[in-house]
Amino acid sequence: MCPSSPLSSPRLRVLSGIQPSGQLHLGNYFGSILPNLEHVGKAKESFFFIADLHALTTMHDAVTLKKAREDIVLDYLACGFDPNKAAIYHQSSISEHTELMWILSTVTPMGLLERAVSYKDKVQQGVIASAGLFTYPVLMAADILLYQAETVPVGRDQKQHVEIARDIAVKFNNLYGETFTVPEPSIRAEVAVVPGIDGRKMSKSYGNIIPLFATDEEVKKAIMGIVTDSKGMSAPKDPEQCTIYQLHKLFLSKEQAKALAEEYRHGLAYGEAKKRLFEAFMDTFGAVRAKRAKLSAQDAAQALEIGRVRAQKVATATMAQVYEAVGLR
Ligand code: ADP
Ligand code: TRP
């Protein structure tokens, strides 16, 4: 680890969020959950929230959203989040997120939002071009700045959003005096983008995921469906061009990955490679999946209450400073 990496400088305040917009998948796990888990314990304080207000930009079905925002808490707990070490809460349970968003939006230049690629991407994918979707990065800045977070572990696709939050923090501090900590994104280079079964970025919205908590059969079906080229069973293959290998690597040490790459070059059949990936998946997630099956709604409610109380305390303190700074007190 490089000396300037946020993970090597302990006692930082770490924060991240995830949208409750569907089944958790390998991209979420390796790009977001695992790095977040690694930060817990090393951090001074950790905050992990369910971005249910952000989810409203793409989900307009109350029943689906309600279930998703409840399920994801259990998913997080099963993955190993300890609610006593990391505050887990729903974004919508702390009204200061939206209060701060308004204040930040009054100092956010339009140009900053116009440059955000995720708005354009989502509109291209068919998401309604609402004002909420456009100002999504301002709400995200509020999520981060409200807790004076120093480190924000996210996947590469969220880097620009964290940079926008930095720009807004600097802008506000310049206008009103030092109020906000300027946050840093933390991105694990080796898993910056986890590919989906079609080779594009794994994403719920592309329908190309390997889900963490689906049935064994569904997971197997997804893995068996990974798209490959049409090289013959025993033909030499290029592991770097192979999605099965790119995914399998996530479960392996450097040495193991190197040995597996050699096998590809010596003609490992895609069918066999998929079978082994499925086994690696089950070895890694077997215990987590069993734990998930045992967790109840009461476990979620307890964790959320502990998290909400901790988050509220910090949110209240920051907003007092903000109101004072802008002249509303
Ligand atoms: P999705 O693209 O499936 O909707 P989200 O946007 O909800 O996923 O992402 C939740 C978290 O998981 C974010 O921190 C994001 O960066 C990370 N993430 C999502 N997909 C991937 C991926 N394919 N590779 C790495 N990280 C990812
Ligand atoms: N936009 C993030 C995503 O789609 C979720 C998110 C919302 C978030 N607010 C955040 C992540 C604050 C980190 C910090 O993945």
Image (cartoon, rainbow, N blue to C red):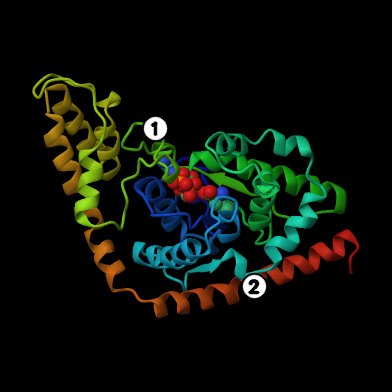
Q: Assess whether mark 2 and mark 1 are in contact (beta carbons under 8 angstroms).
A: no
Quadrant containing the C terminus in the rendered view: bottom right
Please rate how many residues cluster around mark 1, counting C-alpha atoms within 10 Å: few if below 14, some from 14 to 19, many from 20: few
Circle 2 sits on which residue? 312
Q: Is residue 60 above or below residue 237?
A: below
Relative depth, front residue between 223 and 264 = 223
Q: Amino acid at mark 2?
A: Gln
Q: Is residue 37 above or below residue 248?
A: below
Q: Residue at x 14, y 41 (%)?
A: 275
Quadrant containing the N terminus in the rendered view: top left
| Mark identifier at residue 200 | 1
Q: Residue at x 77, y 50 (%)?
A: 105
- Give the side of residue 52 with respect to residue 70, left or right: right
CA distance separating discs 1 and 2: 39 Å
Relative depth, front residue between 276 and 230 = 230
Rendering coords of residue 221 (x, y %): 21, 45
Q: Amino acid at mark 1?
A: Arg
Q: Residue at x 24, y 57 (%)?
A: 215
Residue 94 location, quadrant: bottom right
- Local secondary structure at mark 2: helix
Residue 13 seen:
yes
- Give the side of residue 100 with respect to residue 21, left or right: right
Rendering coords of residue 61 (x, y %): 52, 59
Q: Is residue 300 above or below residue 257?
A: below
Rendering coords of residue 87 (x, y %): 52, 69
Residue 154 seen:
no
- Local secondary structure at mark 1: loop
- Give the side of residue 151 with respect to residue 38, left or right: right
